[in-house]
């Protein structure tokens, strides 16, 4: 139980039954076992009418958990104190199974719960869909959407206005010419290629997309391998699809990851050099390197994922062994100067980190191609606390197939969408997409 061993009161109806400390708590799906003082054991199932969300328990400093024991007696466990992880072990959603026949490289979730998946595939759930698909919230295919990029999709971003940006290695989308980048819009009867935004005409692959927000006006930021009119690796796109020449960033190399802050400054990661920055840079809204403070993380290998958990901190994931001169492996938490704040995982994951997401508590989820972190067994996915420690409650995810996780998305209730090249998760057949539930 670590730091969240707390005083507990057990009650039967209105009568005090026991007073002590939780010394062990086990959870598998909705079943819970509480061991008091190292010996007394009570087990049962979460009463969903009283506690509809186990995740809500972990986010409350004082939480009520109801257990139906032997389906006859109702016990109440009152946990007093503050804790950061409780009942957090994920399990595979048994009803969510899109069944994709090729690698999934990108995911995004709309505000209505529908799910975008992109990658290199030709069928979803046995139905022909090439490289891009829209799923219903239960994982079934939205058959009304059938746009077909002629090459893989590596990046998807849902704008606040509902329009969708995609990037990858394609030249055409269902008969409309779009080189490596496009915007889609819903006209009321389904998504189509947005013709208001013309063909930008990038000359090489796009791996990352984001937006700068100016009220109701959104300006796409695009990262990749391209070199268009002196714009190398990163560009800002106008509403008409043209490359914005007032955006000056011009790194030498490729940009694989982007994070745009609320002030429209941009963190870019990849394999590049730019203005004494290596593989990671912090740019102002117009693409100039920010010089106060000097962000000089300078990882010694490519940055493949970036996230912003809080103001003043940045998470970098990729394939590196040093950041700002400090020995860190494949994931790092740094300040605005690029200085390492925590030795994440201590040691870090033993393979590449390809995706990072931050949850509502400031903890962060990493996905990639690794088998351990912090000397703890974790297969391609791990949850880390705000201090960078491995969350010991987030366990039990195993995969078959090549297995790596390439993309992560979070549902509004904290459940997790994973995409990659795996074919099985926790013994269940799940081809390249799965949903991990923290609630039931």
Image (tube, rainbow, N blue to C red):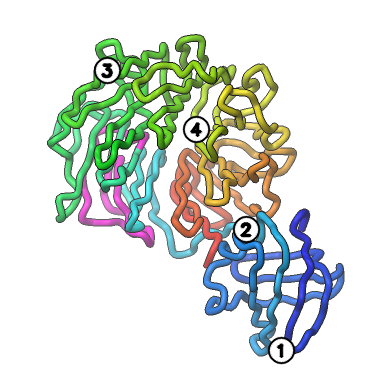
The quadrant of the picture occupied by the N terminus is bottom right
Between marks 3 and 2, how big is the CA–CA gap? 46 Å
* Secondary structure character of the magenta stretch overall: loop
Q: Is residue 229 magenta?
A: no
Residue at x 53% of width, y 79% of height: 49
Q: Categorize mark 1 by other alpha carbons within 10 Å: few (<14), some (14-19), many (20+).
A: few
Closest to the observer, 323 or 64: 64
User: Is label 3 or label 2 in front?
Assistant: 3
Q: Is residue 177 left or right of residue 300?
A: left
SS for callout 1: loop
Residue 61 badge: none
Residue 14 badge: 1
Q: Is residue 125 visible?
A: no
User: Is label 1 or label 2 in front?
Assistant: 1
Which residue does the numbered mark 2 point to in the structure image?
88
Between marks 1 and 2, how big is the CA–CA gap? 29 Å
Q: Categorize mark 4 by other alpha carbons within 10 Å: few (<14), some (14-19), many (20+).
A: many
Q: Earlier in the sequence, mark 1 or mark 2?
A: 1
Residue 187's x, y, as percent?
A: 15, 50
- Residue 319 position (above or below residue 176): above
Residue 306 badge: 4
Residue at x 25% of width, y 12% of height: 229
Between marks 2 and 4, how big is the CA–CA gap? 24 Å
Residue 296's x, y, as percent?
A: 56, 17
Residue 259's x, y, as percent?
A: 44, 33
Which residue does the numbered mark 3 point to in the structure image?
246
Between marks 1 and 4, how big is the CA–CA gap? 51 Å
Residue at x 39% of width, y 44% of height: 107
Q: Earlier in the sequence, mark 3 or mark 4?
A: 3
């Amino acid at each position: 139980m670590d730091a969240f061993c707390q005083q507990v009161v057990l009650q039967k109806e209105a009568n005090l039954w026991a007073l002590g400390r939780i010394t062990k708590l086990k959870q598998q799906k909705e079943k819970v076992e509480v061991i008091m003082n190292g010996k007394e054991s009570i087990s049962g199932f979460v009463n969903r009418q009283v506690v509809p969300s186990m995740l809500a328990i972990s986010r409350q400093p004082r939480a009520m958990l109801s257990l139906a024991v032997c389906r006859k007696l109702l016990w109440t466990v009152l946990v007093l104190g503050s804790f950061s992880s409780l009942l957090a072990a994920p399990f595979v959603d048994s009803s969510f199974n899109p069944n994709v026949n090729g690698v999934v490289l990108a995911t995004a979730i709309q505000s209505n719960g529908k799910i975008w998946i992109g990658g290199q595939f030709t069928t979803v759930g046995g139905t022909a869909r090439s490289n891009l698909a829209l799923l219903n919230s239960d994982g079934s295919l939205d058959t009304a959407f059938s746009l077909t990029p002629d090459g893989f999709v590596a990046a998807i971003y849902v704008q606040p206005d509902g329009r969708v940006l995609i990037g990858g290695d394609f030249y055409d989308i269902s008969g409309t010419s779009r080189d490596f980048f496009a915007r889609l819009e819903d006209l009321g009867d389904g998504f189509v290629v947005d013709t208001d935004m013309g063909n930008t005409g990038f000359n090489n692959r796009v791996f990352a997309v984001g937006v700068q927000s100016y009220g109701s006006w959104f300006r796409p930021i695009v990262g990749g391998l391209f070199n268009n009119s002196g714009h190398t690796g990163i560009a800002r796109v106008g509403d008409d699809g043209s490359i914005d020449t007032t955006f000056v960033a011009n790194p030498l190399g490729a940009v694989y990851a982007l994070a745009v802050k609320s002030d429209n400054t941009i963190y870019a990661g990849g394999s590049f050099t730019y203005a004494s920055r290596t593989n990671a840079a912090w740019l102002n809204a117009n693409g100039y390197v920010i010089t106060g403070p000097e962000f000089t993380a300078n990882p010694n290998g490519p940055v493949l994922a970036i996230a912003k958990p809080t103001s003043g901190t940045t998470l970098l994931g990729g394939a590196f062994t040093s950041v700002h001169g400090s020995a860190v492996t494949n994931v790092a938490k740094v300040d605005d100067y690029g200085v390492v704040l925590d030795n994440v995982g201590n040691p870090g994951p033993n393979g590449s980190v390809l995706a990072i997401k931050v949850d509502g508590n400031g903890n962060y989820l990493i996905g990639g191609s690794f088998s351990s972190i912090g000397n703890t067994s974790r297969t391609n996915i791990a949850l880390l606390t705000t201090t960078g420690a491995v969350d010991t409650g987030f366990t039990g995810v195993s995969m078959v197939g090549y297995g790596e996780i390439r993309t992560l998305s979070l549902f509004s209730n904290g459940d997790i969408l994973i995409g990659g090249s795996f074919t099985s998760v926790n013994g269940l057949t799940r081809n390249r997409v799965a949903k991990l539930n923290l609630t039931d």
